[in-house]
Every structure is written in C-alpha cells, then in structure tokens.
C-alpha cells in the first residue's frame, strides 16, 4: 500500500567511545556499533536512548534540506531567578555552552522524502527540555511558517514541563502554544505530534496532546505529573507500566507507537496519504 523508502542515516555526532556500553535500562552490556546502527536503541530491551534535537533532525529530515528558522531568539531572565548557589542566567549559559543552542527547541523547514514540512524539535539536554518563553514563541512561529508555506507541522516533544525559573511567563506558553496549533485547523493543515521519552508536565498538558495524529516512541514516559508525585499524593500504588506510551495507547491518548527506525517511513506514509487526498 505504501511506497517503501530505504535509507541508512548515520548520526553525525557519534556517542560511541570504545566497543561496548552498558544499557541505562536493562544494564546489559551492548555492542556500540549495533547500538549506533539501531539509532541508539538497546538491542536487548529496546530502550530508546535520548537524542539531541539536531540528531532527531538528521534522523527525520532529508540530508541538505533543513533550513533552520529564528535561531537568534534568546531567553531572558525576567525574574532575576536565583538558586541557593547559582542563578538562572548562569544555568542558561551552561546549557547554551553544552548544547550549542540558545534555548530548548530548534525549528525549521525541511523535507521528508521530498515532502516539505515545518518541524520543531525539543532538546532534553537544554534544562530538561523545559518550556519557557523562547520554546513557546518558536512553536508559535513554527505554526505561522506552516501556514505561510501551506505545509504540515511536525513537532517532536521531550520535556520535563514548564520552566519554573520563568514563572508565569513560562506557564502562559501552555495557553499560547495551544492557541497557536489550533490555528492550523482553520487552514486545514495537518499537525503531527511525536512524543519521546519523557513528555511530561506543561508540555503534555498543552500542545503535545493536541496533534491530529499523536505518535510515541516505545516505552516513553508520557503523562502530566511523574508516577512518584502521584503515588505520594494519592497514597496508592499505581498499576504497572502506568504512563508509558503503551499505556497511553491503550487508553486513547496516543494513536500509534512507532519504533525509532520506522519514524521517518511512518511520517512519509502519512504525508503521502494526506498529499494524495
Ligand atoms: Zn537495554
């Protein structure tokens, strides 16, 4: 039914040092080369290791077609937020140096097997993928670009939630991003959401659950508050696998679970169907 595309992507920034590594989940020793070939998925337990935003883009977007937009938006420390031993400004600087990004999301235009799309990818490495003013603003911008170019929007979420260091300014991004993605409906443009480990807090309570189609990687933590917080609040044990993407699929919050190696092909199948329509 669908045209099969074959392509082998090599993630540029090789994380492998040496021949072997220990899986974070099952603690088995795995062969680095095999782990890289599987796009950083454990061959033993299928645990999907985290990818940076740029690695995701490499995985999903045709080589040489990605054009980043609005790279020059910088976060500000409106509340002069202080920790006991450091400041938000200091934390931002560290995160910027570590990731080479100004904030926790990259947006841009690119192709998926020649179908143009607008894409936004969050980065967990940047302050736990938290959503502050910049992330919210760039998601809104991505919606506007999708409308301007009349192309579908794909967002990839990974987030611990709202960025508390920005207080109310970060919480209002929930309403802002939700209102922005609702605009796509008026223009009859599809919005495809990909949930990766973890998608929680204010992100799961706003745009991430509003996709026309919601995909999730296997075994991803998807939910609002973490299981520990809920157990402490309701003083009850939660069922096994609670808040896994599989659990959310069973309960109707997620439409499909897609293995990392099949993500691009699945996106292509959907786009092929929609463009044909
Ligand atoms: Zn494993």
Image (cartoon, grey):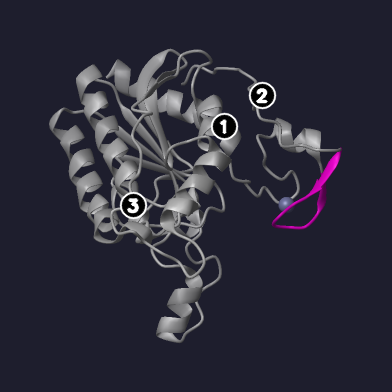
Q: Which residue is mark 1?
A: 55
Q: Nearer the viewer, residue 51 or 102?
A: 102
Tell me the magenta residue range.
19-30
Q: Nearer the viewer, residue 213 or 167?
A: 167
Kindly state the secondary structure of the residue where label 1 is placed: helix
Which numbered dot is residue 77?
Answer: 3
| Residue 124 seen from this side | no
Mark 2 or mark 3: which is in front?
3
Q: Which residue is mark 2?
A: 10
The earlier-in-sequence mark between 1 and 2 is 2
Instruction: Give the Cα distance between marks 1 and 2.
Output: 9 Å
Q: Position of residue 31 (x, y in %)?
A: 83, 40
Relative height, residue 27 to residue 242 (above, below): above
Q: Is mark 1 within 8 Å of ligand 1?
A: no
Kindly state the secondary structure of the residue where label 3 is placed: loop
Any magenta on residue 207?
A: no
Instruction: Give the Cα distance between marks 3 and 1.
Output: 28 Å
Q: Nearer the viewer, residue 9 or 95?
A: 95
Mark 2 Cα-neighbour bin, 10 Å: few <14, some 14–19, many ≥20: some
């Amino acid at each position: 039914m669908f045209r099969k595309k074959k392509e082998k992507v090599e993630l540029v920034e090789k994380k492998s040092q040496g021949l072997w590594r220990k899986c974070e989940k099952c603690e088995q020793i795995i062969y680095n080369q095999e782990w890289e070939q599987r796009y950083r998925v454990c061959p033993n337990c299928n645990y999907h290791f985290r990818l940076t935003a740029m690695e995701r883009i490499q995985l999903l977007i045709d080589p040489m077609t990605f054009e980043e937009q609005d790279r020059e938006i910088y976060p500000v420390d409106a509340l002069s937020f202080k920790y006991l031993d450091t400041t938000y400004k200091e934390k931002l600087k560290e995160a910027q140096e570590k990731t080479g990004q100004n904030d926790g999301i990259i947006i841009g235009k690119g192709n998926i097997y020649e179908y143009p799309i607008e894409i936004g990818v969050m980065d967990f490495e940047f302050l736990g993928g938290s959503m502050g003013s910049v992330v919210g603003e760039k998601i809104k911008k991505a919606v506007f670009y999708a409308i301007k170019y009349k192309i579908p929007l794909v967002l990839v979420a990974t987030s611990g939630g709202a960025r508390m260091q920005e207080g109310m300014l970060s919480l209002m991004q929930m309403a802002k991003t939700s209102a922005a993605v609702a605009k796509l409906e008026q223009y009859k443009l599809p919005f495809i959401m990909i949930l990766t480990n973890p998608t929680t807090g204010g992100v799961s309570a706003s745009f991430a659950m509003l996709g026309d189609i919601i995909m999730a990687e296997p075994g991803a933590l998807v939910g609002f508050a973490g299981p520990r917080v809920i157990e402490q609040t309701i003083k009850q044990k939660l069922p096994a696998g609670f808040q896994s993407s599989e659990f959310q699929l069973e309960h109707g919050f997620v439409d499909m679970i897609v293995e990392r190696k099949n993500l691009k092909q699945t996106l292509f199948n959907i786009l092929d169907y929609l463009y044909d329509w």
